[in-house]
Amino acid sequence: LFTHIDHVGIAVRDLDEAISFYEEKYGMKMLHREENEEQGVAEAMMAVGDSTSCIQLLAPLNEKSTIAKFIEKNGVGIQQMAYRVESIDEVCATLKERGLRLLYPEPKRGTAGSRINFIHPKDAGGVLVELVEPNPEGMH
Ligand code: MC0
């Protein structure tokens, strides 16, 4: 069903500070950075070595952001686990058949024009699981 770990998402308060930490302490390179208003986040993708898996740093764009709510409740730290898929439409249909709730009826726009959806954490053992179909012209 899933082909790779696409990224692990980490909620941070200050994106620039977090990027510097990952660059200076871990030697990671930033592959991509953008603001996604629909999701309420400023985000940066940090490459883990030569793999295509990333750490996604997520800072809230405003106080209504899901990331602001997450930090208020839990503090900073791991917010989500994202798997890469080939066809998000097929994977979502399969997961629905298997009784899992997806957050969106249709995929939304994610990093670099990817198509994304989420499995509700209450149906996934307390883990917010994101599904990512990368944009072929995007970052991977
Ligand atoms: C909430 N819960 C979580 C959780 N967020 N559990 C694990 N991981 C998380 N991140 C749990 C809470 O502890 C609570 O359980 C219950 O779910 C309801 O939480 P809530 O605090 O009342 O929050 P809701 O229901 O308002 O929102 C939770 C929900 C939301 C997952 C629906 O965060 C959401 O829509 N997330 C998907 C979008 C997203 O995260 N966007 C930001 C990343 P209890 O037991 O206390 O009831 S954007 C992104 O990732 C894009 C750019 C990309 O990668 O391309």
Image: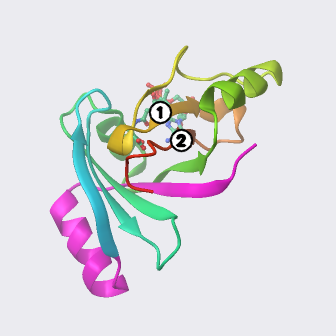
Q: Secondary structure at mark 1?
A: strand
State the image coordinates of residue 59 (x, y, percent, origin top left): 26, 49
Q: Quadrant of the N terminus?
A: top right
Q: Quadrant of residue 97?
A: top right
Mark 1 Cα within 10 Å, few/some/many (few <14, many 20+)? many
Q: Determine contact: label 2, label 1, CB under 8 Å.
A: yes
Three-letter code for the amino acid on which mark 1 is drawn: Arg
In the displayed image of the protein, which residue is found farthest to the right?
A: 98
| Residue 89 falls within the magenta-colored stretch | no
Question: What residue is shown at x 35% (from left), y 78% (from top)?
Answer: 28
Q: Which residue is mark 2?
A: 132
Q: Which residue is mark 1?
A: 115
Question: What residue is shown at x 18% (from left), y 68% (from top)?
Answer: 17
Q: Secondary structure at mark 2?
A: strand
Q: Quadrant of the C terminus?
A: bottom left
Q: Is mark 2 within 8 Å of ligand 1?
A: yes
Front position in the image: 39 or 52: 52
- Sequence-first tag of 2 and 1: 1
In the displayed image of the protein, which residue is found farthest to the front?
A: 137
State the image coordinates of residue 113 (x, y, percent, origin top left): 36, 38
Three-letter code for the amino acid on which mark 2 is drawn: Val
Disc sitting over residue 14 in the figure: none
The answer to whether one can see residue 114 in this image is: yes
Question: What residue is shown at x 53% (from left), y 41% (from top)?
Answer: 132
User: Coloring scheme of the render?
Assistant: rainbow
